[in-house]
Image: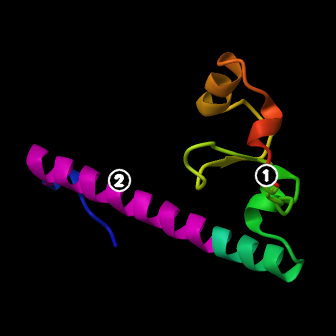
Amino acid sequence: MSIDLNELDLSELKKLQKDVEKAINEYQDRKINEARQRLEAEARAMGFTLNEVVEGKRKANASKSPPKYRHPEDSSVTWTGRGRKPAWVIEHLNAGRDMEELELQ
């Protein structure tokens, strides 16, 4: 395919420029997707996800800690005892009450 650019006017040249830029972007997107698919398949074949390979570490199975404390008025609200104390625990302690009162039996 050969185009004599000298025969095109400015609007045709600008349209051609946009078309070429669009074609280049689509080509690059297609190649990136092909590469990603190949890498994901290779990682799966080795027992990993692509993210695990890229990050360099395997995600640990997050084990949820069982709740140790329960809200005194709303039994559906619990806390494991890990991390920051919830506001209701702080309020309970500030009222001069003991943490043991909140413990699950």
In the rendered image, which residue does mark 1 sit on? 104
SS at circle 1: loop
Is the image coloured rainbow, by chain, by secondary structure, or in one colour? rainbow
Most foreground residue, 7 or 57: 57
Counting other residues with Cα less than 10 Å from the Cα at mark 1, is it few (<14), some (14-19), or many (20 or more)? few
Tell me, yes or no, whether the highlighted magenta stretch contains residue 28: yes
Instruction: Estimate the spatial distance between the alpha carbons at disc 2 and disc 1, rounded to whole Å.
Output: 65 Å
- Quarter where residue 59 is shown: bottom right
Q: Residue at x 63, y 42 (%)?
A: 72
> What percent of the width, then of the height, locates residue 20?
33, 57
Chief secondary structure of the magenta portion: helix
Q: Quadrant of the N terminus?
A: bottom left
Residue 35, placed above or below residue 4: below
Q: Amino acid at mark 2?
A: Glu
Q: Residue at x 19, y 47 (%)?
A: 14
Most foreground residue, 85 or 46: 85
- Give the residues drawn in magenta, as a range: 8-34
Q: Is residue 77 left or right of residue 100?
A: left
> What percent of the width, then of the height, locates residue 89?
67, 31
Q: Residue furthest bottom?
A: 45
Q: Residue at x 74, y 41 (%)?
A: 102
- Quarter where residue 43 is shown: bottom right
Q: Amino acid at mark 1?
A: Leu
Q: Is residue 96 left or right of residue 46?
A: left
Q: Which mark is residue 78?
A: none
> What percent of the width, then of the height, locates residue 98?
79, 28
Most foreground residue, 16 or 76: 76
In the rendered image, which residue does mark 2 sit on? 21
